[in-house]
Image (cartoon, rainbow, N blue to C red):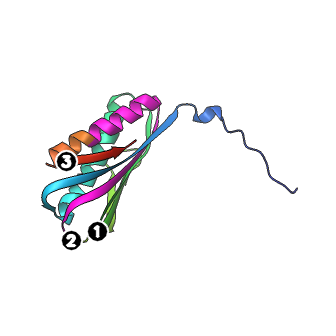
Amino acid sequence: MTGFVALNSTNPVHDDINSYGMRCVVTAAKPVSADELRRFAAGLMTAIASACITAGAKDVSHVKAFIEHETGFIHADTVGNPDNVKVEGRDGKPAESFRLVVNSVIYGLSAHAVKEITESETSKTVGLFGLVRTCAEK
């Protein structure tokens, strides 16, 4: 058999899976250490995944974050269990600002709920760490 097989782009199996991605720049009054950035990343993953479960998600397919600054890059993720967060990357020097990208893929919540939870928990976590979210691109 040769040629391409056309896949149905609206597979009903995926009807209840929704995702949301966001980018922002986060700043701090004083440089944030690599350890603190790692704690922030882990806390953010736990906060988003836990809030999704509390809101009735059937499964956390994944929540991922990428933190990039002048001398370092950290990525964090959780799949299924909000308590099982992995944080890896190259730490670099303390950073006064960093780019943050978050992607949430959730089964069992509406697209609106996934967006609202991702945005809300990001804002809360940024505040808890004494940071400021300076711009958002939605």
User: Residue 50: x, y in percent?
Assistant: 31, 38
Residue 74 inside the magenta-drawn segment: no
Mark before the other along the chain sequence, 3 or 1: 1
User: Residue 90: x, y in percent?
Assistant: 31, 70
Which three-letter amino acid code belongs to the residue tagged 1? Glu
Q: Mark 3 points at which residue?
A: 132
Disc on res. 93: 2
Q: Distance between the residues labelled 3 and 1?
A: 18 Å
| Residue 109 visible from this viewpoint | no
Disc on res. 53: none
Residue 95 vs residue 18, the one in the foreground: 95
The image shows residue 17, relative to residue 84, as above or below, that is above
Q: In this rendering, which labeled residue sits more in front, label 1 or label 2?
A: 1
Disc on res. 70: 1
Secondary structure at badge 2 equals loop
Q: In which quarter of the image is the N terminus?
A: bottom right
For the residues bearing labels 1 and 2, Cβ distance under 8 angstroms: yes
Mark before the other along the chain sequence, 2 or 3: 2
Secondary structure at badge 3 equals strand
Residue 100 vs residue 2, the one in the foreground: 100
Q: In this rendering, which labeled residue sits more in front, label 2 or label 3?
A: 3
